[in-house]
Amino acid sequence: MNSHETYETLAAVYAVGALDGDDLASFEAHLATGCDQCATLVRDSREALARLTLADTPAVPPPDVKTALLARIGTAGRARPSRRGWLTWTAATAAVVALAVMLASGIVASRYEAQLGRMARETAKERERLLAQETALRTQVAAMELLRDPTTRVIELRGTSSNATARLIWNEKAGGYLLASNLSPAPEGKAYELWALGGPQPRPAGLFQVDAEGRAVQKVEPGGEAKSFAVTLEPATGVPAPTGPIVMASR
């Protein structure tokens, strides 16, 4: 539907006073440009509604016309087809107006529904952004608290075949946080798994995924002494011992 067809549809809604907000302002501004077609549609719609109202509440003739009516009783029957034709035209016009109102209301409702849907998506996106910022802030505060402890270490991890890097803020008693960057997203069904090294066997220290920019922040639970750490690519459910390739490791 082009822009003027939209105005033509809204004309019937305007005629019954059902337009409001931006649609009302837009249509009245359009009328102010001197559009004869839309002005005629509004006028015809209002006249049709007025005729329909008059048809529903017929006037009662005064008593002094009784004789004249009886005298013309013979011609009244011939006049009925004309009356029925007028009523048929009025009913048809009213039906067209009602249909136009319904169609216009549907268009307006669809427009508002689309706007509400877009607003809901934007609100959800903004909520996700604020939640991510809140999580990042909480992580920064927790990491700062860990760094106050003199036993906390900052461990650097380097990619084995890429420019991926990570820092692990690690405290054997409190755990820590892994901050990774420049990692490629894991393939479908896969995840990155952090390992604590230094004991008899590598100890799993957490699964994580990266965002679209290759970054990740992963909380690491405490689990005892660890001399070094490594990251491997594993099944998304995790494994008790490394099976996949090493993608990052500390020195």
Image: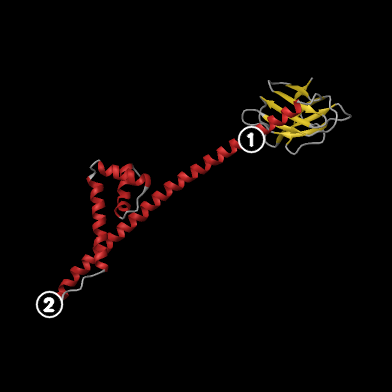
Instruction: Write the residue at 85% across / 28% down.
Output: 225
The image quadrant that residue 204 belongs to is top right
Q: Secondary structure at mark 1?
A: helix
Amino acid carrying label 2: it is: Asp
Q: Position of residue 67 (x, y in %)?
A: 11, 79
Could you tell me if the residues under marks 1 and 2 are in contact, i.e. CB atoms within 8 Å?
no
Q: Is residue 179 left or right of residue 52?
A: right
One can see residue 245 in this view? no
Q: Is residue 90 left or right of residue 210?
A: left
Pointer 1: what residue?
134
- Name the quadrant of the N terminus: top left
Say if 172 sits above or below 72 in the image.
Answer: above
Q: Position of residue 139 (x, y in %)?
A: 69, 32
Could you tell me which quadrant the C terminus lies in? top right
Residue type indicated by callout 1? Glu
Could you say where residue 49 lies in the image, as x and y percent from the top left? Answer: 27, 60
**Foreground pick, 21 / 39:** 21
| Distance (Cα) linking label 1 and label 2 | 87 Å
Going 84% across and 30% down the picture, which residue do you hit?
Answer: 202
Instruction: Give percent across and percent down for residue 213.
Output: 62, 28
236 relative to 127 in the view: left or right: right
Note whether 203 is above or below 98 in the view shown: above
> Which residue is denoted by mark 2 in the rendering?
64
* Residue 25 appearing in the image: yes
Q: Residue at x 37, y 46 (%)?
A: 21
